[in-house]
Amino acid sequence: MRTKRLSLSRKLLQGLLPLMVAILVSGGGVAYFVAHYAATVAYDRNLMNSALAIAVHIEVSDGHVHLDLPKIAEEVLLNDAYDQLFYEVIDAKGVRVAGNADLPRAAKPLELNRFYYDGSFNGKLVRVAAVFHGHQKTPVTILFAETTSKRDLLVREILLAMLVPEVLLIIAAVFMIRRSVSYGLASIQPFREELVRRTQTDLRQITLKGIPEEIYPIFAEVNELLARLSAALDAQRHFVADASHQLRTPIAALQAEAEMALRASDPSEYLKRIVAGTRRITHLAHQLLTLSRIEQQQIHSPKIVDLSELTRDAAERWMPLAMQRNIDLGFELSPAKVMGDPVWLEELANNLIDNALRYTPSGGIVTVRCNSTASQITWEVEDSGPGIPKEEHERIFKRFFRLDTTGVDGCGLGLAIAREIAHNHNATITIEEGKNLGGALLRVTFPQKSESH
Protein backbone atom coordinates (compact mmCIF):
# COMPACT_ATOMS: atom_id res chain seq x y z
CA MET A 1 0.00 0.00 0.00
CA ARG A 2 1.45 3.32 -1.07
CA THR A 3 1.83 5.87 1.71
CA LYS A 4 0.09 9.17 1.02
CA ARG A 5 2.64 11.95 1.37
CA LEU A 6 1.75 15.43 2.50
CA SER A 7 2.64 18.06 -0.10
CA LEU A 8 4.79 21.04 0.83
CA SER A 9 2.09 23.52 -0.21
CA ARG A 10 -0.48 21.70 1.92
CA LYS A 11 1.97 21.69 4.82
CA LEU A 12 2.43 25.45 4.46
CA LEU A 13 -1.30 25.99 4.24
CA GLN A 14 -1.87 23.91 7.37
CA GLY A 15 0.48 26.25 9.18
CA LEU A 16 -0.85 29.47 7.66
CA LEU A 17 -4.59 28.83 7.50
CA PRO A 18 -5.12 28.96 11.28
CA LEU A 19 -3.35 32.33 11.28
CA MET A 20 -5.45 33.52 8.35
CA VAL A 21 -8.66 32.37 10.04
CA ALA A 22 -7.59 34.10 13.26
CA ILE A 23 -6.96 37.30 11.29
CA LEU A 24 -10.34 36.93 9.58
CA VAL A 25 -12.16 36.36 12.88
CA SER A 26 -10.41 39.24 14.63
CA GLY A 27 -10.99 41.43 11.59
CA GLY A 28 -14.66 40.47 11.66
CA GLY A 29 -14.85 41.42 15.33
CA VAL A 30 -13.25 44.79 14.69
CA ALA A 31 -15.43 45.34 11.62
CA TYR A 32 -18.58 44.53 13.60
CA PHE A 33 -17.58 46.96 16.35
CA VAL A 34 -16.86 49.71 13.84
CA ALA A 35 -20.05 49.05 11.88
CA HIS A 36 -22.21 48.88 14.99
CA TYR A 37 -20.69 52.06 16.37
CA ALA A 38 -21.11 53.91 13.08
CA ALA A 39 -24.73 52.79 12.68
CA THR A 40 -25.56 53.64 16.28
CA VAL A 41 -24.09 57.14 16.11
CA ALA A 42 -25.72 57.95 12.77
CA TYR A 43 -29.22 56.72 13.57
CA ASP A 44 -29.19 57.89 17.20
CA ARG A 45 -28.79 61.46 15.98
CA ASN A 46 -31.84 61.13 13.72
CA LEU A 47 -33.77 59.58 16.58
CA MET A 48 -32.88 62.45 18.92
CA ASN A 49 -33.79 65.01 16.27
CA SER A 50 -37.25 63.43 15.98
CA ALA A 51 -37.68 63.56 19.77
CA LEU A 52 -36.66 67.24 19.78
CA ALA A 53 -39.07 67.94 16.92
CA ILE A 54 -41.91 66.64 19.08
CA ALA A 55 -40.69 68.71 22.05
CA VAL A 56 -41.23 71.88 19.97
CA HIS A 57 -44.99 71.15 19.74
CA ILE A 58 -45.57 70.62 23.48
CA GLU A 59 -47.74 73.22 25.21
CA VAL A 60 -48.62 73.66 28.89
CA SER A 61 -51.89 75.29 29.92
CA ASP A 62 -52.98 75.60 33.56
CA GLY A 63 -50.46 72.95 34.52
CA HIS A 64 -51.76 70.51 31.92
CA VAL A 65 -49.48 69.23 29.18
CA HIS A 66 -50.77 69.11 25.59
CA LEU A 67 -49.15 68.03 22.32
CA ASP A 68 -50.13 70.27 19.45
CA LEU A 69 -48.73 68.12 16.59
CA PRO A 70 -50.55 68.32 13.26
CA LYS A 71 -51.54 64.99 11.74
CA ILE A 72 -49.46 65.55 8.65
CA ALA A 73 -46.39 66.31 10.79
CA GLU A 74 -46.94 63.13 12.82
CA GLU A 75 -47.16 61.06 9.64
CA VAL A 76 -43.92 62.57 8.39
CA LEU A 77 -42.16 61.85 11.69
CA LEU A 78 -43.39 58.25 11.82
CA ASN A 79 -42.74 57.47 8.15
CA ASP A 80 -39.78 55.09 7.57
CA ALA A 81 -39.15 52.57 4.80
CA TYR A 82 -37.37 50.06 7.05
CA ASP A 83 -38.38 50.52 10.68
CA GLN A 84 -41.44 51.12 12.79
CA LEU A 85 -41.35 54.39 14.74
CA PHE A 86 -43.05 55.14 18.06
CA TYR A 87 -43.21 58.07 20.41
CA GLU A 88 -44.68 58.91 23.79
CA VAL A 89 -45.05 62.13 25.76
CA ILE A 90 -45.08 61.69 29.55
CA ASP A 91 -45.92 64.33 32.16
CA ALA A 92 -44.28 64.80 35.56
CA LYS A 93 -46.54 62.18 37.13
CA GLY A 94 -45.55 59.56 34.61
CA VAL A 95 -48.87 59.65 32.82
CA ARG A 96 -48.95 59.34 29.03
CA VAL A 97 -50.02 62.55 27.40
CA ALA A 98 -49.74 61.53 23.75
CA GLY A 99 -48.30 58.85 21.48
CA ASN A 100 -47.99 55.12 21.99
CA ALA A 101 -48.67 53.63 25.37
CA ASP A 102 -46.11 51.76 27.46
CA LEU A 103 -42.91 52.43 25.55
CA PRO A 104 -39.97 50.96 27.52
CA ARG A 105 -38.88 53.29 30.29
CA ALA A 106 -35.27 54.01 31.14
CA ALA A 107 -33.72 51.68 33.69
CA LYS A 108 -31.94 54.61 35.35
CA PRO A 109 -33.22 57.99 36.58
CA LEU A 110 -33.42 60.81 34.09
CA GLU A 111 -30.35 62.58 35.37
CA LEU A 112 -29.42 63.75 31.88
CA ASN A 113 -31.52 65.89 29.57
CA ARG A 114 -30.83 63.59 26.61
CA PHE A 115 -29.73 59.96 26.46
CA TYR A 116 -30.33 56.66 24.65
CA TYR A 117 -31.15 53.12 25.71
CA ASP A 118 -32.35 49.82 24.27
CA GLY A 119 -35.57 48.06 25.09
CA SER A 120 -38.39 45.87 23.80
CA PHE A 121 -41.80 46.96 22.53
CA ASN A 122 -44.50 44.71 21.14
CA GLY A 123 -41.99 41.84 21.06
CA LYS A 124 -39.46 43.76 18.99
CA LEU A 125 -36.12 45.28 19.89
CA VAL A 126 -36.22 49.05 19.82
CA ARG A 127 -33.77 51.90 20.29
CA VAL A 128 -35.14 54.76 22.38
CA ALA A 129 -34.08 58.42 22.51
CA ALA A 130 -35.21 60.17 25.71
CA VAL A 131 -35.47 63.94 26.17
CA PHE A 132 -36.19 65.55 29.57
CA HIS A 133 -37.94 68.85 28.73
CA GLY A 134 -38.84 71.47 31.35
CA HIS A 135 -41.61 73.43 29.52
CA GLN A 136 -42.80 76.45 31.50
CA LYS A 137 -41.34 74.88 34.62
CA THR A 138 -43.40 71.76 33.99
CA PRO A 139 -41.23 68.69 33.48
CA VAL A 140 -42.06 66.65 30.39
CA THR A 141 -40.37 63.52 29.04
CA ILE A 142 -40.41 62.70 25.34
CA LEU A 143 -39.52 59.16 24.19
CA PHE A 144 -38.96 58.41 20.53
CA ALA A 145 -38.23 54.80 19.56
CA GLU A 146 -37.60 52.78 16.42
CA THR A 147 -36.97 49.15 15.57
CA THR A 148 -33.43 48.16 14.58
CA SER A 149 -33.91 46.85 11.02
CA LYS A 150 -31.97 49.53 9.17
CA ARG A 151 -29.26 49.55 11.84
CA ASP A 152 -28.79 45.79 11.42
CA LEU A 153 -28.85 46.20 7.65
CA LEU A 154 -26.15 48.87 7.79
CA VAL A 155 -24.00 46.71 10.09
CA ARG A 156 -24.30 43.78 7.66
CA GLU A 157 -23.41 45.95 4.69
CA ILE A 158 -20.34 47.37 6.42
CA LEU A 159 -19.30 43.87 7.56
CA LEU A 160 -19.62 42.49 4.04
CA ALA A 161 -17.73 45.46 2.63
CA MET A 162 -14.84 44.79 5.03
CA LEU A 163 -14.84 40.97 5.19
CA VAL A 164 -15.40 40.07 1.53
CA PRO A 165 -12.03 41.59 0.47
CA GLU A 166 -10.33 39.74 3.34
CA VAL A 167 -11.87 36.42 2.25
CA LEU A 168 -10.83 37.10 -1.35
CA LEU A 169 -7.31 37.91 -0.18
CA ILE A 170 -7.13 34.60 1.73
CA ILE A 171 -8.32 32.68 -1.33
CA ALA A 172 -5.76 34.52 -3.46
CA ALA A 173 -3.05 33.78 -0.86
CA VAL A 174 -3.90 30.06 -0.91
CA PHE A 175 -3.73 30.04 -4.70
CA MET A 176 -0.44 31.96 -4.75
CA ILE A 177 1.14 29.71 -2.10
CA ARG A 178 0.33 26.57 -4.10
CA ARG A 179 1.51 28.18 -7.33
CA SER A 180 4.68 29.62 -5.78
CA VAL A 181 5.63 26.30 -4.17
CA SER A 182 5.13 24.48 -7.47
CA TYR A 183 7.16 27.12 -9.30
CA GLY A 184 9.93 27.08 -6.69
CA LEU A 185 10.22 23.30 -6.64
CA ALA A 186 10.26 23.12 -10.43
CA SER A 187 13.82 24.46 -10.28
CA ILE A 188 15.07 21.27 -8.59
CA GLN A 189 13.49 18.93 -11.14
CA PRO A 190 16.70 18.81 -13.26
CA PHE A 191 18.65 17.66 -10.19
CA ARG A 192 16.13 14.90 -9.55
CA GLU A 193 16.39 13.77 -13.17
CA GLU A 194 20.18 13.77 -12.88
CA LEU A 195 20.06 11.51 -9.82
CA VAL A 196 17.57 9.17 -11.54
CA ARG A 197 19.94 8.73 -14.48
CA ARG A 198 22.91 7.81 -12.28
CA THR A 199 24.03 4.29 -11.53
CA GLN A 200 24.62 2.99 -8.02
CA THR A 201 28.37 3.55 -8.37
CA ASP A 202 28.15 7.12 -9.70
CA LEU A 203 28.72 9.18 -6.56
CA ARG A 204 29.89 12.41 -8.18
CA GLN A 205 28.98 15.68 -6.49
CA ILE A 206 25.82 17.47 -7.60
CA THR A 207 26.32 20.90 -9.14
CA LEU A 208 24.57 23.26 -6.73
CA LYS A 209 24.23 26.16 -9.13
CA GLY A 210 20.62 27.34 -9.46
CA ILE A 211 19.30 25.70 -6.30
CA PRO A 212 17.06 28.02 -4.23
CA GLU A 213 18.64 29.31 -1.04
CA GLU A 214 15.94 27.77 1.21
CA ILE A 215 16.70 24.19 0.12
CA TYR A 216 20.39 24.69 -0.61
CA PRO A 217 21.45 23.15 2.76
CA ILE A 218 19.59 19.93 1.86
CA PHE A 219 21.50 19.51 -1.38
CA ALA A 220 24.74 20.48 0.36
CA GLU A 221 24.12 17.66 2.84
CA VAL A 222 23.35 15.32 -0.07
CA ASN A 223 26.75 16.20 -1.52
CA GLU A 224 28.35 15.54 1.87
CA LEU A 225 26.61 12.17 2.00
CA LEU A 226 27.75 11.34 -1.53
CA ALA A 227 31.31 12.24 -0.54
CA ARG A 228 31.13 9.97 2.52
CA LEU A 229 29.61 7.15 0.48
CA SER A 230 32.29 7.56 -2.18
CA ALA A 231 35.01 7.45 0.47
CA ALA A 232 33.39 4.40 2.10
CA LEU A 233 33.08 2.66 -1.26
CA ASP A 234 36.73 3.39 -2.11
CA ALA A 235 37.78 2.13 1.32
CA GLN A 236 35.72 -1.02 0.79
CA ARG A 237 37.35 -1.63 -2.58
CA HIS A 238 40.80 -1.12 -1.12
CA PHE A 239 39.89 -3.36 1.80
CA VAL A 240 38.75 -6.16 -0.49
CA ALA A 241 41.85 -5.76 -2.66
CA ASP A 242 44.18 -5.71 0.37
CA ALA A 243 42.39 -8.64 2.00
CA SER A 244 42.64 -10.67 -1.19
CA HIS A 245 46.33 -9.88 -1.43
CA GLN A 246 46.97 -10.68 2.23
CA LEU A 247 45.09 -13.97 2.05
CA ARG A 248 46.64 -15.07 -1.25
CA THR A 249 50.18 -15.38 0.13
CA PRO A 250 49.50 -17.54 3.23
CA ILE A 251 47.03 -19.71 1.32
CA ALA A 252 49.57 -20.28 -1.45
CA ALA A 253 52.24 -21.11 1.16
CA LEU A 254 49.83 -23.47 2.93
CA GLN A 255 49.08 -25.22 -0.36
CA ALA A 256 52.80 -25.58 -1.10
CA GLU A 257 53.45 -27.05 2.37
CA ALA A 258 50.57 -29.51 1.89
CA GLU A 259 51.91 -30.63 -1.50
CA MET A 260 55.39 -31.10 -0.02
CA ALA A 261 53.91 -33.13 2.83
CA LEU A 262 52.23 -35.46 0.34
CA ARG A 263 55.54 -36.18 -1.38
CA ALA A 264 57.70 -36.40 1.75
CA SER A 265 58.48 -39.72 3.43
CA ASP A 266 58.23 -38.02 6.86
CA PRO A 267 55.56 -35.27 6.63
CA SER A 268 55.63 -34.34 10.34
CA GLU A 269 57.75 -31.21 9.80
CA TYR A 270 55.51 -30.07 6.99
CA LEU A 271 52.42 -30.75 9.09
CA LYS A 272 53.77 -28.45 11.82
CA ARG A 273 54.21 -25.72 9.23
CA ILE A 274 50.70 -26.38 7.92
CA VAL A 275 49.29 -25.99 11.45
CA ALA A 276 51.22 -22.74 11.95
CA GLY A 277 50.06 -21.44 8.58
CA THR A 278 46.47 -22.39 9.37
CA ARG A 279 46.69 -20.45 12.63
CA ARG A 280 47.97 -17.39 10.77
CA ILE A 281 45.14 -17.60 8.24
CA THR A 282 42.60 -18.10 11.03
CA HIS A 283 43.95 -15.07 12.87
CA LEU A 284 43.89 -12.98 9.68
CA ALA A 285 40.33 -14.06 8.88
CA HIS A 286 39.25 -13.22 12.43
CA GLN A 287 40.83 -9.77 12.20
CA LEU A 288 39.25 -9.11 8.80
CA LEU A 289 35.79 -10.08 10.06
CA THR A 290 36.26 -7.99 13.21
CA LEU A 291 37.27 -4.92 11.20
CA SER A 292 34.34 -5.37 8.82
CA ARG A 293 31.86 -5.71 11.69
CA ILE A 294 33.14 -2.74 13.69
CA GLU A 295 32.94 -0.47 10.60
CA GLN A 296 29.31 -1.39 9.95
CA GLN A 297 28.05 -1.39 13.53
CA GLN A 298 27.26 1.55 15.75
CA ILE A 299 26.80 1.40 19.51
CA HIS A 300 23.09 1.92 20.17
CA SER A 301 22.77 0.66 23.77
CA PRO A 302 25.92 1.63 25.68
CA LYS A 303 26.49 0.31 29.20
CA ILE A 304 28.68 1.35 32.08
CA VAL A 305 31.93 -0.60 31.73
CA ASP A 306 34.67 -0.72 34.39
CA LEU A 307 37.94 -0.80 32.44
CA SER A 308 39.87 -2.20 35.43
CA GLU A 309 37.60 -5.24 35.71
CA LEU A 310 37.52 -5.73 31.95
CA THR A 311 41.35 -5.62 31.83
CA ARG A 312 41.67 -8.20 34.63
CA ASP A 313 39.35 -10.52 32.71
CA ALA A 314 41.45 -10.07 29.56
CA ALA A 315 44.66 -10.75 31.54
CA GLU A 316 43.54 -14.28 32.35
CA ARG A 317 43.54 -15.10 28.64
CA TRP A 318 46.86 -13.40 27.83
CA MET A 319 48.87 -14.45 30.86
CA PRO A 320 49.65 -17.99 29.55
CA LEU A 321 51.01 -16.55 26.27
CA ALA A 322 53.07 -13.98 28.17
CA MET A 323 54.55 -16.72 30.36
CA GLN A 324 55.24 -18.85 27.29
CA ARG A 325 57.20 -15.97 25.71
CA ASN A 326 58.91 -15.13 29.03
CA ILE A 327 57.32 -11.65 29.16
CA ASP A 328 56.41 -9.96 32.42
CA LEU A 329 52.77 -8.90 31.92
CA GLY A 330 51.80 -6.52 34.72
CA PHE A 331 48.85 -4.31 35.61
CA GLU A 332 48.43 -0.93 37.31
CA LEU A 333 44.67 -0.52 37.47
CA SER A 334 42.46 2.10 39.11
CA PRO A 335 38.66 2.26 38.92
CA ALA A 336 37.75 3.84 35.59
CA LYS A 337 34.24 3.61 34.19
CA VAL A 338 33.14 4.56 30.69
CA MET A 339 29.95 4.25 28.66
CA GLY A 340 30.35 1.77 25.85
CA ASP A 341 29.96 -1.74 24.48
CA PRO A 342 31.77 -4.25 26.73
CA VAL A 343 32.33 -6.72 23.86
CA TRP A 344 34.05 -4.15 21.65
CA LEU A 345 36.04 -2.67 24.53
CA GLU A 346 37.27 -6.18 25.32
CA GLU A 347 38.28 -6.55 21.68
CA LEU A 348 40.16 -3.24 21.99
CA ALA A 349 42.05 -4.53 25.04
CA ASN A 350 42.85 -7.82 23.29
CA ASN A 351 44.31 -6.08 20.24
CA LEU A 352 46.46 -3.66 22.27
CA ILE A 353 47.81 -6.39 24.56
CA ASP A 354 48.34 -8.79 21.64
CA ASN A 355 50.25 -6.11 19.72
CA ALA A 356 52.48 -5.41 22.74
CA LEU A 357 53.22 -9.12 23.35
CA ARG A 358 54.07 -9.71 19.69
CA TYR A 359 56.64 -6.90 19.50
CA THR A 360 58.19 -7.33 22.94
CA PRO A 361 61.22 -9.66 22.90
CA SER A 362 61.62 -12.54 25.32
CA GLY A 363 62.44 -11.34 28.84
CA GLY A 364 60.69 -8.01 28.23
CA ILE A 365 57.92 -6.23 30.12
CA VAL A 366 54.38 -5.20 29.19
CA THR A 367 52.34 -3.03 31.56
CA VAL A 368 48.64 -2.25 31.25
CA ARG A 369 47.25 0.81 33.09
CA CYS A 370 43.92 2.58 33.48
CA ASN A 371 43.03 5.58 35.59
CA SER A 372 40.42 8.32 35.87
CA THR A 373 40.72 12.08 36.39
CA ALA A 374 38.18 14.87 36.55
CA SER A 375 38.44 15.54 32.80
CA GLN A 376 39.31 12.21 31.18
CA ILE A 377 39.84 8.46 31.48
CA THR A 378 42.99 6.86 30.09
CA TRP A 379 43.81 3.28 29.19
CA GLU A 380 47.47 2.55 28.41
CA VAL A 381 49.58 -0.38 27.23
CA GLU A 382 53.35 0.14 27.49
CA ASP A 383 56.05 -2.34 26.46
CA SER A 384 59.84 -2.66 26.47
CA GLY A 385 60.01 -3.54 22.79
CA PRO A 386 61.82 -1.68 20.00
CA GLY A 387 59.22 1.10 19.94
CA ILE A 388 57.63 2.81 16.96
CA PRO A 389 59.46 5.53 15.04
CA LYS A 390 57.75 8.91 15.36
CA GLU A 391 57.33 9.27 11.61
CA GLU A 392 55.33 6.02 11.59
CA HIS A 393 52.89 6.99 14.36
CA GLU A 394 50.07 7.78 11.95
CA ARG A 395 50.75 5.08 9.35
CA ILE A 396 50.84 2.35 11.98
CA PHE A 397 47.04 2.57 12.28
CA LYS A 398 46.46 1.90 8.59
CA ARG A 399 45.21 -1.48 7.51
CA PHE A 400 47.83 -4.13 6.72
CA PHE A 401 50.67 -1.72 7.53
CA ARG A 402 53.48 -3.38 9.45
CA LEU A 403 56.83 -2.17 10.63
CA ASP A 404 59.96 -3.72 9.17
CA THR A 405 60.42 -6.06 12.12
CA THR A 406 61.70 -9.51 11.35
CA GLY A 407 60.57 -12.50 13.31
CA VAL A 408 57.22 -10.94 14.33
CA ASP A 409 54.10 -12.74 13.17
CA GLY A 410 51.19 -10.37 12.50
CA CYS A 411 48.74 -9.24 9.86
CA GLY A 412 48.77 -5.44 10.36
CA LEU A 413 45.12 -5.11 11.40
CA GLY A 414 45.23 -5.03 15.20
CA LEU A 415 45.84 -1.30 15.61
CA ALA A 416 43.43 -0.44 12.78
CA ILE A 417 40.74 -2.34 14.67
CA ALA A 418 41.73 -0.61 17.91
CA ARG A 419 41.36 2.84 16.35
CA GLU A 420 37.94 2.03 14.89
CA ILE A 421 36.67 0.82 18.28
CA ALA A 422 38.10 3.89 20.03
CA HIS A 423 36.49 6.20 17.46
CA ASN A 424 33.10 4.55 18.00
CA HIS A 425 33.44 5.34 21.72
CA ASN A 426 34.32 9.03 21.19
CA ALA A 427 37.83 8.18 22.31
CA THR A 428 41.26 8.95 20.79
CA ILE A 429 44.20 6.60 20.52
CA THR A 430 47.77 7.92 20.38
CA ILE A 431 51.31 6.53 20.37
CA GLU A 432 54.12 7.84 22.54
CA GLU A 433 57.57 6.75 23.55
CA GLY A 434 57.34 4.78 26.79
CA LYS A 435 59.14 6.71 29.55
CA ASN A 436 59.09 3.81 32.01
CA LEU A 437 59.90 0.81 29.83
CA GLY A 438 61.56 2.44 26.83
CA GLY A 439 59.33 0.89 24.15
CA ALA A 440 56.00 2.03 22.72
CA LEU A 441 53.14 3.41 24.79
CA LEU A 442 49.65 3.26 23.27
CA ARG A 443 47.14 5.45 25.10
CA VAL A 444 43.35 5.45 24.64
CA THR A 445 41.73 8.60 26.06
CA PHE A 446 38.02 8.73 26.83
CA PRO A 447 36.29 12.00 27.72
CA GLN A 448 34.90 11.92 31.25
CA LYS A 449 31.25 10.78 31.23
CA SER A 450 31.69 9.81 27.60
CA GLU A 451 28.81 8.44 25.61
CA SER A 452 29.14 6.28 22.56
CA HIS A 453 27.56 7.10 19.22
Image (tube, rainbow, N blue to C red):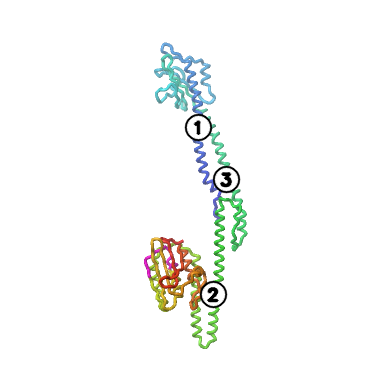
Q: Which mark is residue 188?
A: none
Percent x, y of residue 201 = 59, 63
CA separation in Å, label 1 and label 2: 90 Å
> What amino acid type is highlighted by mark number 2?
Leu
Q: Quadrant of residue 309?
A: bottom left
Q: Nearer the viewer, mark 2 or mark 3?
A: 2
The residue segment tinted magenta is 332-345
Q: Quadrant of residue 346?
A: bottom left
Q: Secondary structure at mark 1?
A: helix
| Residue farthest to the left, as pictured | 334
Magenta stretch: includes residue 343: yes
Q: Which mark is residue 177?
A: 3
Residue marked by disc 1: 34
Q: Secondary structure at mark 2?
A: helix
Percent x, y of residue 251 = 54, 77
Q: Which mark is residue 247?
A: 2
Which residue is at 39% across, 73% downward?
330
Disc 2 crowd rating (10 Å Cα; few below 14, some 14-19, many 20+) is some
